[in-house]
Image (cartoon, helix red, strand yellow):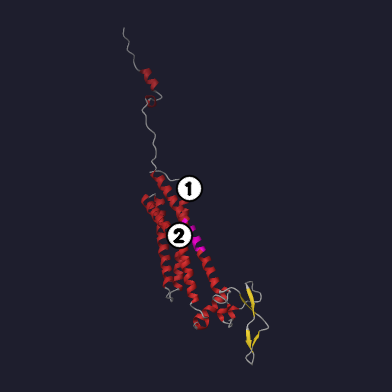
Amino acid sequence: MGKVNVWLKRSYICTIGVIAVIAVFTLGMALFGHGLSMHEEDDQFLMGIYFFYGYSVVTLLFAIIGGFGVWKEKQWALIAFAVGMILGCLFFILIEISFPFAHKEMERELKNNYLSMLPLSNVSESELSEFYHTQSELHCCGITSLGDWENNIPESCKCDIDSSDDCMDVYLPMHNDSGLNLLNVKPIRIYAKPCLQVLIQIEKRSLSTFLGIMSAKTLLWILSVGLCIAILFQLNKKVETPNVVYSREAKAGNYDILNDAQEPTLKIE
């Protein structure tokens, strides 16, 4: 069995250490999210929580196996780590490839969900209150345009005086005692962007961020697999031993000349 380069071993340990820390952090976030959603009945959200549970536990398990393999120089553990991480990389790559299709589907569902609320005059009080909160948080007004409120613009649409968001002035008609429509002398400043446009932009940014994290994580896993395979090659490398060649001169001692001097010589007369 060959000897593993110390810097290669340290690089591998640091890499799987980072992977283990990420897995522990993800597990903690999954536990926290599960605790917040105990009273909710969103099946898709719970499925996401369970996915993060499985991902965190499996990743942490493989990181422990990989650490044990390099510590004890066990080839079976390193091979199990490499195979498991390669399968994980393939899974991540498959998700990244399917992301554009998933993004289009999510955008379509988001549009259908909010467009089904139109007209806003028929929305329930709970949904209306939630949409008020959305407008205040995202600084938008209406679902597709200002006309969704039919001149009954709520307070959540109004811009602050010192707001840095895109705002516009709107003159709303008002009625006098005789029922005639007049123009309000003082305009109302409201947010210019409709909420559906803002929500789609936020979703695109979130998915792009998630895709970037997935790509970085995939590269980290590929790095760990490469280091693991390099360690396996070094462990399988045979140690070359020098060939032993018999030499009479090498066997002879430094005092052989004295023995030769003391040997009797036979004279023949």
- The image shows residue 39 at horizontal and vertical percentages of 43, 76
Q: Nearer the viewer, residue 202 or 268?
A: 202
x then y, percent, for residue 72: 39, 50
Q: Residue at x 45, y 55 (%)?
A: 221
Left/right placement of residue 39 relative to residue 268 reads right
Q: Amino acid at mark 2?
A: Ile
At mark 1, the secondary structure is helix
Above or below 156: residue 254? above
Mark linked to residue 252: none
Q: Quadrant of residue 195?
A: bottom right
Image quarter (top left, top right, bottom left or bottom right) of the N terminus: top left
Q: Main secondary structure of the magenta part?
A: helix
Q: Provide the residue span drawn in magenta.
A: 208-218
Nearest to N terminus: mark 1 or mark 2: 1
The amino acid beneath tag 1 is Trp
Examine the structure image and report whether residue 85 is included in the region drawn in magenta: no
Residue 63 seen in the figure: no
- Residue position for label 2: 97
Q: Residue at x 48, y 58 (%)?
A: 215
The correct choice, above or below, for 116 with respect to 8 in the image is below
Residue indicated by mark 1: 7
* Foreground of the two, 191 or 180: 180
Displayed quadrant of residue 146: bottom right
